[in-house]
Image (cartoon, rainbow, N blue to C red):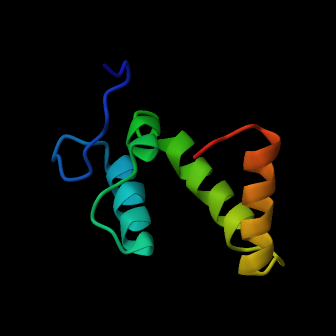
Amino acid sequence: MGRLPLVDSSDPGTDPLAREVLQATAAARGRSVDPNVYRAIANHPRALQAMVQFGTVVYFQNSMTPAQRELAYLTASLTNDCHY
Protein backbone atom coordinates (compact mmCIF):
# COMPACT_ATOMS: atom_id res chain seq x y z
CA MET A 1 0.00 0.00 0.00
CA GLY A 2 1.40 3.39 -0.97
CA ARG A 3 1.86 6.06 1.64
CA LEU A 4 1.45 9.00 -0.72
CA PRO A 5 -1.82 9.54 -2.50
CA LEU A 6 -1.55 9.63 -6.27
CA VAL A 7 -2.92 12.84 -7.75
CA ASP A 8 -5.43 12.41 -10.57
CA SER A 9 -5.12 15.07 -13.26
CA SER A 10 -8.77 14.57 -14.24
CA ASP A 11 -10.06 15.18 -10.71
CA PRO A 12 -11.71 18.62 -10.49
CA GLY A 13 -10.32 19.00 -6.95
CA THR A 14 -6.72 18.67 -8.11
CA ASP A 15 -4.49 21.71 -7.63
CA PRO A 16 -4.57 23.71 -10.88
CA LEU A 17 -0.76 23.79 -11.23
CA ALA A 18 -0.50 20.04 -10.64
CA ARG A 19 -3.26 19.41 -13.19
CA GLU A 20 -1.57 21.65 -15.75
CA VAL A 21 1.87 20.03 -15.36
CA LEU A 22 0.49 16.47 -15.38
CA GLN A 23 -1.62 17.12 -18.47
CA ALA A 24 1.25 18.83 -20.30
CA THR A 25 3.59 15.95 -19.43
CA ALA A 26 1.08 13.36 -20.62
CA ALA A 27 0.56 15.29 -23.86
CA ALA A 28 4.30 15.57 -24.45
CA ARG A 29 4.69 11.83 -23.95
CA GLY A 30 1.71 11.05 -26.15
CA ARG A 31 0.01 9.08 -23.39
CA SER A 32 -3.15 9.68 -21.43
CA VAL A 33 -1.82 8.03 -18.25
CA ASP A 34 0.60 9.84 -15.97
CA PRO A 35 3.50 7.85 -14.48
CA ASN A 36 2.88 7.15 -10.79
CA VAL A 37 6.08 8.91 -9.75
CA TYR A 38 4.73 12.14 -11.27
CA ARG A 39 1.34 11.58 -9.67
CA ALA A 40 2.98 11.16 -6.26
CA ILE A 41 5.20 14.23 -6.63
CA ALA A 42 2.14 16.21 -7.77
CA ASN A 43 1.17 16.39 -4.09
CA HIS A 44 3.64 19.29 -4.15
CA PRO A 45 2.91 20.95 -7.51
CA ARG A 46 5.92 23.26 -7.55
CA ALA A 47 8.25 20.31 -6.90
CA LEU A 48 6.62 18.44 -9.79
CA GLN A 49 7.02 21.45 -12.06
CA ALA A 50 10.72 21.76 -11.14
CA MET A 51 11.32 18.03 -11.61
CA VAL A 52 9.72 18.03 -15.06
CA GLN A 53 11.75 21.09 -16.10
CA PHE A 54 14.96 19.49 -14.82
CA GLY A 55 14.20 16.18 -16.50
CA THR A 56 13.46 17.88 -19.80
CA VAL A 57 16.87 19.54 -19.80
CA VAL A 58 18.76 16.48 -18.60
CA TYR A 59 17.07 13.91 -20.82
CA PHE A 60 16.17 15.82 -23.98
CA GLN A 61 17.84 19.23 -24.25
CA ASN A 62 21.44 18.08 -24.25
CA SER A 63 24.13 17.43 -26.83
CA MET A 64 24.05 13.61 -26.66
CA THR A 65 22.63 11.50 -29.44
CA PRO A 66 19.86 9.02 -28.59
CA ALA A 67 22.42 6.19 -28.82
CA GLN A 68 24.74 7.96 -26.37
CA ARG A 69 21.84 8.56 -23.96
CA GLU A 70 20.88 4.90 -24.10
CA LEU A 71 24.49 3.89 -23.45
CA ALA A 72 24.57 6.22 -20.44
CA TYR A 73 21.31 4.73 -19.07
CA LEU A 74 22.56 1.16 -19.51
CA THR A 75 25.96 1.99 -17.97
CA ALA A 76 24.29 3.60 -14.96
CA SER A 77 21.97 0.59 -14.56
CA LEU A 78 24.87 -1.85 -14.71
CA THR A 79 27.04 0.23 -12.37
CA ASN A 80 24.18 0.47 -9.83
CA ASP A 81 23.23 -3.21 -10.14
CA CYS A 82 19.76 -2.42 -11.53
CA HIS A 83 18.28 -5.54 -13.11
CA TYR A 84 15.29 -4.08 -14.92
Which residue appears at 38% of the width and 48% of the height?
Answer: 18
Residue found at x 44% / y 73%:
28
Q: Quadrant of residue 65?
A: bottom right
Residue 9, above or below 39? below
The picture places residue 12, in percent across and down from the top left corner, at 15, 47
Horizontal side of 80 relative to 8 (left or right) equals: right
Query: Which percent across, then down, holds residue 80?
Result: 77, 38
Total numbered circles: 0
Q: Which of 60 and 11 is in front in this view?
A: 60
List x then y, in percent, for residue 27. 37, 72
- Please tell me which residue is depicted at 63% across the width and 42% down the height of the picture: 83
Q: Which residue lies furthest to the front in this view?
A: 83
Q: Position of residue 39 (x, y in %)?
A: 38, 42
Where, by quadrant of the figure, is residue 61 drawn? bottom right
Placement of the N terminus among the 4 image quadrants: top left
User: In the image, is 48 to the left or to the right of 36?
Assistant: right
Q: Nearer the viewer, residue 25 or 66?
A: 66
Please tell me which residue lies in front, 78 or 55.
Answer: 78
Taking 37 as reference, is 82 left or right?
A: right
Q: In this view, does 24 lie above or below 81?
A: below
Residue closest to the far left:
12
32 or 42: nearer the viewer: 32
